[in-house]
Image (cartoon, rainbow, N blue to C red):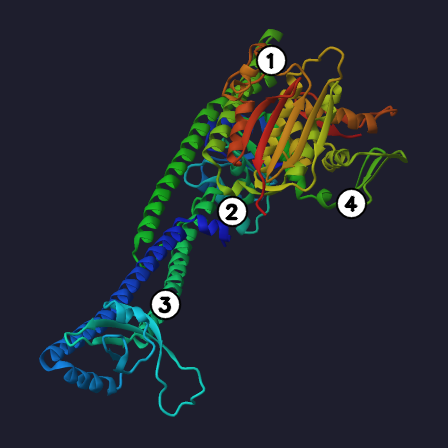
């Protein structure tokens, strides 16, 4: 399963998170707007009511004088509800009303005000308890009769409603976030699982089992479309690989049969024991040359196969330490006979998935090259080192010598097919040894390079290690 | 030895029959897969040499069918295909050895002679003795005329393989395959160096050498 940090890097999770964010922001904005509108409407209803009452009382005052006004205000003040009424004479002295502690500026300077006041106690409540505080929205008007009229509403309840609405909206937003998070996780997991199935299949195919196919569900969705296309592509690749294998097999058969005959005839003629020495020598040379031809041909076929990627049947888990140690042990005595010291520096227990034969052959090619092209440097004992070590998750196989080395400009060229440096042209060989090493390394997902060992050659096969 | 050769290339076949005859073996020849299978399943042979690519029926299917019929005659597969996976599939099908074309006749001869011995008890023996040289496979001790010879593990396996096939020629590639488990042609005389070291340990100071070099073929251990 994916780790959290890896999970965050997937497009699915990022897109889901983005959609979630957009959705939540949008919901919050929408709910906020509704809340604001509701609050505004409630407030407007109150101010409208205040304005209506004030206008009505102004009319009563104009028509009927201050007595009518006082009666009307008295009636209104006695009704239960949030209404606030207050009448004062010209000097600001209270005549009647259901509030007492008005701020002085309400009376001195008519207009609209909001202030806190002491509410009258509801009947039956203890006299010593602190009086409840209310918030009032009022309008004060100077009437024609000279009275100062204050009409208003207690806004505590209205603000309370508003707060309750806001609270529920908050709960709603939290709910939306939780549910969309759950929905997001469910969606992301489903999508990731489908993608992971395709990935797992691809990995199996890349590790060699070309017959694997991406599972197709009956949902017939875009993933099934993708899976179907991938499978068709894989069918095609398998066909091509099969075709290529058949071609190389046939070429191998058709070219090797006449070569076998050639060799057989020469061998047969040689066994007959007729002819003079010169003829015998010619026959022996014919056999040698046909052997050389077949070696080159085999090496080419092997490179072609390795580059095409061999079927996984030839891959298995192997002890690379043993392979490297074996090759060093195989060539140790030969090196010694040639006056060189072959040192093996092998880390134990390095295992990986690969082909023992091909890796062994690649390593043999490197060691044989080191032996073949070694030239003693004045005053130094010849030494070839075969080493296997781990470098983080990678595995390094190195064959180094302390000979004259390869000039920097030739180092990448020698890996190419049939390339042989000037001084090696006189020696036997096909010029394919390093190409094979390179092909085998690539087949194992690694990289082959030649470096300067200062002095000498350092041939490095860098392979990916086994995960975990 | 009585040998069955299943090979569609007539020229290669007639050459092989003649060469095997010179080596003292009787060879029956089948030119296609069906005939070869019929002959292989109805008659008793010491060794079968089967080409992989055959008309009418391919070599691997012949071997698989024979093995399914409980026929355990040793089989040497001949093939123009020399890839690692081809060799693996060949041996998995029931072949006992695999030789890639073109081959030296000496190589083929050495291999079938060793193969024919596989059905004999030598395979299971716990010790070998060749003219005063004794090798015990259980205690992993080697003695010559009562004197203990100390061998490296690889030298022991080399000698063990030679003694198991005492009196038979073993080629360099056979040694590389059976002792080191590698199937390639070394470009250098890497095997000869190992052999000369082994010879130094077992034959040094003795008048009659046991380890012989067979020119143009390989090595043999005998009295």
Q: Regarding mark 3 in the picture, which secondary structure is present there? A: helix
Which label sits on residue A427? Answer: 1
Which label sits on residue A170? Answer: 3
Question: Disc 3 is attached to a residue of which chain?
Answer: A
User: Image quarter for residue A31?
Assistant: bottom left
Disc 1 or disc 3, which is closer to the eye? Answer: 3
Q: Going by the image, does A439 lie left or right of A328?
A: left
Per the model, the C-alpha gap separating discs 2 and 4 is 31 Å
Disc 4 or disc 1, which is closer to the eye? Answer: 1
Query: Around disc 4, counting alpha carbons within 10 Å, would you say few (fewer than 14), some (14 to 19), or many (20 or more)?
Result: few
In the rendered image, the residue lying farthest to the left is A63
Disc 2 or disc 1, which is closer to the eye? Answer: 1
The answer to which of marks 2 and 4 sits earlier in the sequence is: 2
In the rendered image, the residue lying farthest to the bottom is A124
Q: Regarding mark 2 in the picture, which secondary structure is present there? A: helix
Question: Disc 2 is attached to a residue of which chain?
Answer: B
Per the model, the C-alpha gap separating discs 4 and 3 is 88 Å
Residue at x 76%, y 12% (from the top left corner): A379
Dot 4 and dot 1 within a common chain: no
Per the model, the C-alpha gap separating discs 1 and 3 is 86 Å
Q: Going by the image, does A460 lie left or right of A157?
A: right
Q: Going by the image, does A6 lie left or right of A78?
A: right
Residue at x 55%, y 13% (from the top left corner): A421
Q: Which residue is mark 2?
A: B64
Q: A29 or A51: which is nearer to us?
A: A51
Dot 4 and dot 3 within a common chain: no
Per the model, the C-alpha gap separating discs 2 and 1 is 45 Å
**Place of residue A3 in the rendered image (x, y in percent of width and height, measured from the top left):** 51, 52
The answer to which of marks 1 and 3 sits earlier in the sequence is: 3
Per the model, the C-alpha gap separating discs 2 and 3 is 76 Å
Residue at x 51%, y 24% (from the top left corner): A260
């Amino acid at each position: 399963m994916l780790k959290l940090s890896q999970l965050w890097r997937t497009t699915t999770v990022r897109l889901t998170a983005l959609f979630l964010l957009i959705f939540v922001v949008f919901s919050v904005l929408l709910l906020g707007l509704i809340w604001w509108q509701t609050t505004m409407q409630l407030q407007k209803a109150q101010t409208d009511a205040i304005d209506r009452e004030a206008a009505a009382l102004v009319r009563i005052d104009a028509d009927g004088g201050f007595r009518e006004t006082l009666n009307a205000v008295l009636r209104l003040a006695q009704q239960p509800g949030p209404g606030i009424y207050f009448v004062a004479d010209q000097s600001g002295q209270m005549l009647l009303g259901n509030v007492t502690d008005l701020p002085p500026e309400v009376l001195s300077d008519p207009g609209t005000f909001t202030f806190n006041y002491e509410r009258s106690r509801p009947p039956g409540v203890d006299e010593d308890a602190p009086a409840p505080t209310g918030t009032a929205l009022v309008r004060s008007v100077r009437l024609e009769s000279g009275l100062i009229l204050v009409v208003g509403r207690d806004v505590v309840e209205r603000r309370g409603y508003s707060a309750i609405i806001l609270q529920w909206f908050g709960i709603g937003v939290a709910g939306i976030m939780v549910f969309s998070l759950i929905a997001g996780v469910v969606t992301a997991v489903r999508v990731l699982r489908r993608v992971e199935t395709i990935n797992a299949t691809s990995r199996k195919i890349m590790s060699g089992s070309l017959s694997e196919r991406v599972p197709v569900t009956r949902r017939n969705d875009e993933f099934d479309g993708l899976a179907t296309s991938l499978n068709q592509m894989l069918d095609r690749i398998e066909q091509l690989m099969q075709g290529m294998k058949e071609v190389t097999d046939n070429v191998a058969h058709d070219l090797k049969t006449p070569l076998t005959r050639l060799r057989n005839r020469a061998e047969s003629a040689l066994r007959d024991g007729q002819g003079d020495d010169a003829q015998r020598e010619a026959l022996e040379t014919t056999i040698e040359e046909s052997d050389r031809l077949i070696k080159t041909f085999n090496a080419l076929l092997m490179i072609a196969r390795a580059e095409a990627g061999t079927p996984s049947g030839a891959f298995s888990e192997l002890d690379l330490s043993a392979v490297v140690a074996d090759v060093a042990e195989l060539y140790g005595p030969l090196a010694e006979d040639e006056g060189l010291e072959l040192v093996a520096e092998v880390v134990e227990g390095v295992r990986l998935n690969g082909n023992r034969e091909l890796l062994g052959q690649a390593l043999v090619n490197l060691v044989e090259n080191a032996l073949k092209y070694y030239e003693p440097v004045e005053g130094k004992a010849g030494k070839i080192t075969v080493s296997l070590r781990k470098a983080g998750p990678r595995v390094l196989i190195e064959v180094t010598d302390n000979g004259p080395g390869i000039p920097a400009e030739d180092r990448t060229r020698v890996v190419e097919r049939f390339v042989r440096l000037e001084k090696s042209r006189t020696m036997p060989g096909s010029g394919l040894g390093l190409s094979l090493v390179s092909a085998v390394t690539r087949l194992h997902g690694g990289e082959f390079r030649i470096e300067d060992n200062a002095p000498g050659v350092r041939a490095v096969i860098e392979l990916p290690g086994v995960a975990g | 030895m009585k040998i069955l050769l299943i090979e569609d290339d007539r020229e290669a076949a007639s050459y092989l029959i003649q060469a095997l005859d010179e080596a003292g073996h009787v060879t029956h020849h089948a030119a296609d897969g069906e005939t070869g299978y019929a002959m292989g399943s109805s008659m008793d042979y010491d060794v079968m040499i089967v080409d992989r690519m055959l008309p009418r029926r391919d070599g691997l299917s012949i071997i698989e069918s024979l093995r399914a019929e409980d026929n355990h005659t040793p089989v040497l597969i001949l093939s123009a295909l020399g890839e690692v996976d081809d060799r693996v599939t060949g041996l998995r099908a029931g072949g006992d050895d695999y030789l890639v074309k073109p081959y030296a006749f000496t190589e083929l001869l050495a291999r079938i002679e060793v193969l024919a011995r596989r059905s004999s008890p030598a395979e299971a023996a716990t010790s070998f003795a060749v003219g005063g040289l004794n090798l015990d496979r259980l205690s992993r001790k080697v003695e010559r005329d009562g004197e203990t010879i100390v061998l490296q593990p690889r030298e022991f396996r080399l000698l063990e393989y030679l003694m198991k096939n005492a009196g038979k020629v073993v080629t360099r590639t056979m040694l590389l395959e059976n002792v080191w488990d590698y199937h390639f042609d070394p470009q250098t005389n890497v095997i000869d160096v190992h052999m000369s070291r082994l010879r130094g340990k077992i034959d040094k100071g003795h008048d009659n050498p046991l380890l012989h070099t067979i020119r143009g073929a390989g090595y043999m251990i005998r009295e």
